[in-house]
Amino acid sequence: NLSTAPALYLFGDSLLDGGNNNHLPTIAKVNYPPYGNNFPQGITGRFTNGKTIGDFVVYI
C-alpha cells in the first residue's frame, strides 16, 4: 500500500534552487528565451534551462 506525501518542500542551494524571480521587484529577470525552452509550458523564470534535482525527486 503506497501513499503519497501531500507536499514536498525543498530549501536549497544552487543544486536544488534554480531561482524564480518573476514576482520580485528587480530588473534581473529570466522570463525570456532561452530560459525555459526545454519545458512544455515555456518560459519559467528560473535561472536554469533544465530540471533541478528537486524536479526529478517529485517523480520518484
Image: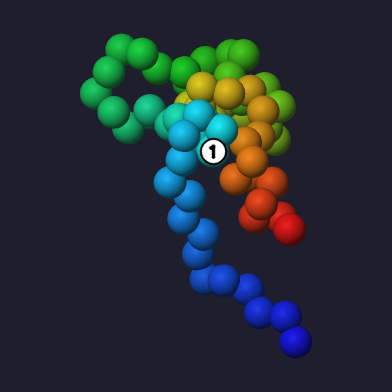
Extreme left residue here? 25
- Residue under the point 64% across and 41% down: 53
Q: Where is residue 52 drawn, in percent x and y?
A: 62, 36
**SS for tag 1?**
loop
Q: Is residue 56 above or below residue 59?
A: above
Residue 54 sits in quarter:
top right
Residue at the (38%, 28%) spot, across then down:
22
Which amino acid, mark 1?
A: Leu
- Identify which residue, 1 or 32, lies in the foreground: 1
Asked whether, in this view, residue 59 is left or right of residue 9, the answer is right
Q: Is residue 59 left or right of residue 32?
A: right
Please state the horizontal and vertical placement of residue 33, each as a whole percent of the image: 59, 14
* Quadrant of the frame with the N terminus: bottom right
Q: Return the residue at label 1.
A: 16
**Residue 59: in sight, yes or no?**
yes
Vertical placement of residue 7 versus 28, above or below:
below
In the picture provided, is 60 more to the left or to the right than 35?
right
* Residue sitting nearer the eye, 27 or 53: 53
Q: Could you tell me how many numbered marks the image carries?
A: 1
Q: Can residue 41 be seen in this view?
A: no
Position in image of residue 46 (x %, y %): 51, 27
Dot 1 crowding, Cα within 10 Å, few <14, some 14–19, many 20+: some
Q: How is the image coloured?
A: rainbow
- In this view, the residue in front, 28 or 8, is 8
Quadrant for the C terminus, please. bottom right
Q: From the top left corner, tell me how far across and down residue 3 is, in percent.
A: 66, 79
Look at the picture and state if 6 lies above or below 27: below
